[in-house]
Amino acid sequence: MQNKLIILSAPSGAGKTTIVHELLDRISNIEFSISATSREKRVTEIHGEDYYFLTTDRFKKGIGNNEFAEWEEVYENQFYGTLKTELERIWSKGNHIIFDIDVAGGINLKKKYGKNALAVFIQPPSVSALEERLRKRKTESDDKIKQRIQKAQQELNSAAKFDIIIVNDDLQKAVAETENAVKRFIHN
Ligand code: ADP
Ligand code: 5GP
């Protein structure tokens, strides 16, 4: 079996985490790539399940030691990245990997893995819908929401660099469309 990568990228709040969880329930041989991050853990999150939470120092050491397949300073002083050991952990079990990563990271992984990667851009119906979702999610301060919305404007301009674009307006429709595309890709 060829090791494949399924990359879901989008501006924060577009719904990629929700869609990834749905896909993990529906498709048996895909496994979530647990990223490393230096941001604070949210109360609902579990270390080693949602993320590997590292100190900024530990993260930077990992960069120096070339431990990451890709990494980004997604927001100021908040680092996120995929450890090479994480890819090996999943591939060694014979599973395909599904990623929930930012737009720049998604483009980098696609460049690196080419035809073995399916890059999916999850597009919100509008920037105002995005802002509303982030406010309702109640996981970020007003300042952090502003930062994320600002970044979203430029990220939306990169949608064309992805293999497919899925508009997440009606969640169930977006999940079904993504599920079909992923199944087609892994069975090819
Ligand atoms: P991301 O991982 O892209 O930051 P999330 O999956 O956390 O986004 O979704 C952001 C918020 O929007 C969550 O509270 C989620 O429940 C909600 N959400 C996701 N998809 C939709 C949708 N189609 N319509 C309305 N709300 C949605
Ligand atoms: P959050 O803080 O909301 O969990 O994630 C913020 C952003 O970082 C999201 O766009 C998320 O997809 C992205 N992200 C999560 N893990 C990684 C990763 O390993 N690499 C990159 N480049 N971005 C990531």
Image (spheres, rainbow, N blue to C red):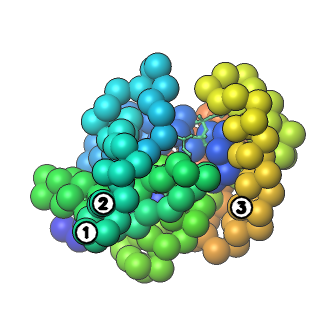
Q: Position of residue 155 (x, y in %)?
A: 71, 61
For the residues labelled 3 and 1, the Cα–Cα distance comes to: 29 Å
Between disc 3 and disc 2, whose residue precedes?
A: 2
- As helix, strand or loop, the secondary structure at mark 3 comes to helix
Looking at the rendering, which quadrant does residue 55 occupy? top left
Determine if residue 12 is in view. Answer: yes
Looking at the picture, which amino acid does disc 2 mark? Answer: Lys
Q: Are marks 3 and 1 in contact (CB under 8 Å)?
A: no
**Label 1 CB-ligand 2 distance < 8 A:** no
Q: According to the image, label 3 marks what residue?
A: 155
Q: Residue at x 78, y 41 (%)?
A: 146
Q: Are marks 3 and 2 in contact (CB under 8 Å)?
A: no
Answer with left or right where residue 89 lies relative to residue 41.
left
Q: Nearer the viewer, residue 151 or 112?
A: 151
Q: Which residue is mark 2?
A: 61
Which residue is farthest front? 57
Look at the numbered disc 1 and give the secondary structure of its residue. loop
Image quadrant for the C terminus?
A: bottom left
Residue at the (74%, 46%) spot, across then down: 147
Contact, mark 2 vs mark 1 (Cβ under 8 Å): yes
Q: Upstream in the sequence, badge 3 or badge 1? A: 1
Q: Residue 65's mark?
A: 1
Relative to the observer, which residue lies in front, 59 or 89? Answer: 59
Relative side of 79 to 59, left or right: right
Residue 47 against residue 55 in the figure, above or below: above
Residue 32 visible in the snapshot: no
